[in-house]
Image (tube, rainbow, N blue to C red):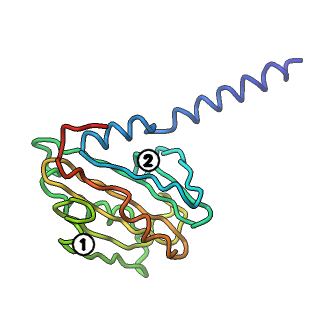
Amino acid sequence: MAYRTILPLAFFFLASALSHAQIRTGDEFARLLGQAGIEFIEPVEANYKRVPAWKNPIQSYDYAIRSRKEGIEIRYLIRPYELGAPASGAPHVEASRLAMHLATNDPDYRIAAREIDPEILSDGFHADWGMQFFFRPKTGFARRNHCELLALHKDGQGTAFVLFLFDEPSRELGHRFYALQFREEGLGKVD
C-alpha cells in the first residue's frame, strides 16, 4: 500500500527536478534573439527535435535541437549587446576563449580556426564579424567526436555562437549553417 503512494510521489519529484535542470525555454530563447536582433529559422526537415538545454558544468547554452537522422546536435548561445560590457566590443576574444574552453585538453588534438569571408558575412548573416572553429569537444560538454563553432557578431546588437556537434561529417551540415541571421534593420523590431 505504501508503495502505491511513494512511487507516484517519487516520479513527481524526479520530473520536477528534471524540469528545473533546464536553463532556457523556447520563450527565453526567443527573448534573447529579439534582444540581439536575430532571426532564427528552425529546420523542419530531417526530424529535428528540440532537446532540453541542460545546465552543463563546462558551458551552459540557450537552446538545442538534434536530428538522429543526420547525426547532428546544434546548440545555440546568444549574447545580446550590453553597453559597457568588455566582451561586447571584442567578439574575437570571446569566441576564441569559448573555443579553447570547450576543446579537449588532449595534446593530440588541435583547434583550427578561420575567418568567414566578408561577403558571406554580409549577404548570408548580415553580420559584421564571423569566425569558424573546429575542434574535439571535452567529453563533459558533449559526447560527440567533433564540434564546429560558428561565431557571428553585429556591432551594437550582439554575438551568436552556434555549436554543431557530430561524430561523422554530414553533407547536411552545410544546410544548417544559415539558421541564424541578424536583422538588416537592426534592433527594435521583435517578432
Secondary element at image label 2: strand
Q: Which quadrant would residue 12 be assigned to in this image?
A: top right
- Neighbor class of circle 1 (other Cα within 10 Å; few <14, some 14-19, many 20+) is some
Residue under the point 19% across and 72% down: 119
Determine whether 100 is above or below 16 in the image: below
Pointer 2 or 1: first along the chain: 2
**Which residue is tagged 1?**
116
Q: Report the disc number at residue 28.
A: none
Point out the image quarter for the N terminus: top right
Image coordinates of residue 175 in percent, x first then y, are 44, 67
**Which residue is tagged 2?**
63
Determine whether 7 is above or below 116 in the image: above
Secondary element at image label 1: loop
Residue under the point 53% across and 44% down: 52
Identity of the amino acid at label 2?
Tyr
Marks 2/1 in contact by CB < 8 Å: the verdict is no
Position of residue 64 in the picture relative to residue 186 (left or right): right
Identity of the amino acid at label 1?
Ile
